[in-house]
Amino acid sequence: MILLYDHPLSPYAQKVKVALDEKGIAYETRIPDGIGVGGVPDTFAEASPRLEVPALIDGDTCLFDSTIILEYIEDKWPEPALLPEGPVERAKQRASVASAQEAAQAVLAGMEQVAGAVEAGLFKREYRDHRLEWMIKSGGLEIVERGLAKGNIRFTPEPGQP
Ligand SMILES: N[C@@H](CCC(=O)N[C@@H](CS)C(=O)NCC(=O)O)C(=O)O
């Protein structure tokens, strides 16, 4: 079974999933532990030396970089074709993918500015966690803080912790 290292927020990983889905190829996905925050496991680092998703493992073949992965998928499973016939049409399609990718990169770069905008009071983050919202609005947060201070509440233990 093909393994795809993936992340729901990675447009590059989605690009690969679209190609696999279009070709009807079965695959498993895995979100590498520590992606975006450091400390990724060796198995992921071996598959993706840049420590980026996507990375694809097909038997003994480990590939990273969505464009290279897409070319591999197209070469290995030519049907249904995702590239048109003819060098000119294929070049145009590759250019279209590259420009879509540049646009996505610009959006992602913009997202990096969000923290600064929040800090400057220009933008408010929205927390879409109804349990957290209910807890805060009902005064539950203070109860948890008091419990933490008294040491009489607990959370789900981390794996391997008592
Ligand atoms: N050129 C690469 C870009 C891949 C990339 O930038 N992936 C990002 C997620 S969108 C990543 O894994 N970043 C690692 C990190 O933030 O630690 C591709 O096309 O696959």
Image (spheres, rainbow, N blue to C red):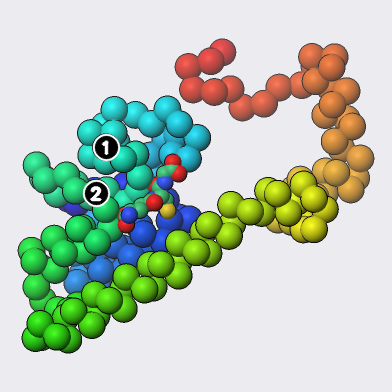
Residue 109 spot, x, y in % from top left:
53, 57
Residue 90 seen by the camera: yes
Q: Is mark 2 within 8 Å of ligand 1?
A: yes
**Mark 1: which amino acid?**
Pro
- Asked which secondary structure carries label 1, the reply is loop
Residue 146 spot, x, y in % from top left:
88, 23
Q: Residues within 10 Å of mark 2 (few under 14, many from 20)?
A: many
Residue 64 numbered mark, or none: 2
Horizontal relation, residue 63 to residue 151: left or right: left
Q: Earlier in the sequence, mark 2 or mark 1?
A: 1
Vertical relation: 29 (above or below) 16: above
Q: Residue at x 53, y 15 (%)?
A: 161
Residue 150 spot, x, y in % from top left:
85, 14
Horizontal relation, residue 60 to residue 117: left or right: left
Horizontal relation, residue 83 to residue 18: left or right: left
Q: How many marks?
A: 2
Q: For residue 102, what is the image quadrant?
A: bottom left
Q: Residue at x 29, y 28 (%)?
A: 42
**Measured Cα–Cα span from mark 2 to mark 1:** 8 Å
**Mark 2: which amino acid?**
Phe
Q: For residue 128, what is the image quadrant?
A: bottom right
Horizontal relation, residue 123 to residue 108: left or right: right
Residue 49 numbered mark, or none: 1
Labelled pair 2, 1 in contact (Cβ < 8 Å): yes
- Asked which secondary structure carries label 2, the reply is strand
Image quadrant where one finds the C terminus: top right
Vertical relation: 139 (above or below) 158: below
Q: Relative to the observer, which residue lies in front, 82 or 161?
A: 82
